[in-house]
């Protein structure tokens, strides 16, 4: 998988504009959700990998995301469903770009056991970019905060 920082950076690029402020955290939740629900179990119980592979699929992640949206206040539920689902789609869009030695992700589980990937980069290739992503986010946030303070004055 592209690392969590890369997922977060891509999400930040999309929802940084002020008009997305209301759903920003929900979009981030959706972006991280497939890894949040699958990786801890896979790491703690690697011998269960055959069973946990279904947890990192669009269907399972969307079901979990829609369930999470139901815990929001009624006036926010529709917006939460859309934001979380959009974040999940971003996550899997990034994952689709990578290459695997063995089977990749089962995008159409439970309807198909075929694995699809574009093979543009290896999963660990994005890790070298983490310092750059963090520097860009930090710099942009500092500049935006500075501009906000000076334009308000």
Image (cartoon, grey):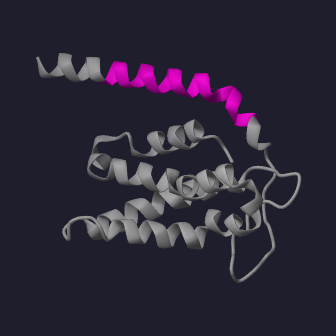
Furthest residue toward right: 101
For the residue pair 79 and 61, the one nearer the viewer reads as 61
User: Picture quarter containing residue 129?
Assistant: top right
The spot of residue 123 in percent (x, y) is 75, 43
Q: Residue at x 42, y 60 (%)?
A: 84
Q: Is residue 108 above or below residue 17?
A: below
**Left or right: 14 in relation to 124:** left
Asked whether residue 54 is drawn in magenta, I would say no
Furthest residue toward bottom: 111
Give the number of callouts. Answer: 0
User: Picture quarter containing residue 113?
Assistant: bottom right
The spot of residue 105 in percent (x, y) is 73, 63
User: Picture quarter containing residue 12?
Assistant: top left
Q: Residue at x 76, y 35 (%)?
A: 125
**Left or right: 148 in relation to 124:** left
Q: Residue at x 43, y 19 (%)?
A: 139
Point out the stretch of residues depicted in magenta. 125-144
Q: Is residue 136 above or below residue 65?
A: above
Q: Is residue 153 above or below residue 30?
A: above
Q: Quadrant of the C terminus?
A: top left
Asked whether residue 138 is drawn in magenta, I would say yes
Q: Residue at x 59, y 51 (%)?
A: 40
Furthest residue toward left: 153
The spot of residue 112 in percent (x, y) is 76, 80
For the residue pair 64 and 98, the one nearer the viewer reads as 64
Q: What type of secondary structure mainly makes up the magenta span?
A: helix
The spot of residue 126 in percent (x, y) is 69, 35
**Left or right: 90 in relation to 76:** right
């Amino acid at each position: 998988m592209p690392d969590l920082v890369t997922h977060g950076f891509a999400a930040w690029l999309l929802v940084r504009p002020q008009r997305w402020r209301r759903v920003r955290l929900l979009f981030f939740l959706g972006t991280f959700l497939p890894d949040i629900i699958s990786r801890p179990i896979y790491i703690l119980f690697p011998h269960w990998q055959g069973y946990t592979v279904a947890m990192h699929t669009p269907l399972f992640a969307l079901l979990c995301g829609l369930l999470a949206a139901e815990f929001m206040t009624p006036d926010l539920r529709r917006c939460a469903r859309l934001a979380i689902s959009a974040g999940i789609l971003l996550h899997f869009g990034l994952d689709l770009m990578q290459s695997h030695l063995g089977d990749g992700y089962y995008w159409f589980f439970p309807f198909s056991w075929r694995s699809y990937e574009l093979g543009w980069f290896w999963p660990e290739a994005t890790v070298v970019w983490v310092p750059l992503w963090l520097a860009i986010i930090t710099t942009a946030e500092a500049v935006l905060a500075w501009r906000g303070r000076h334009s308000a004055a």
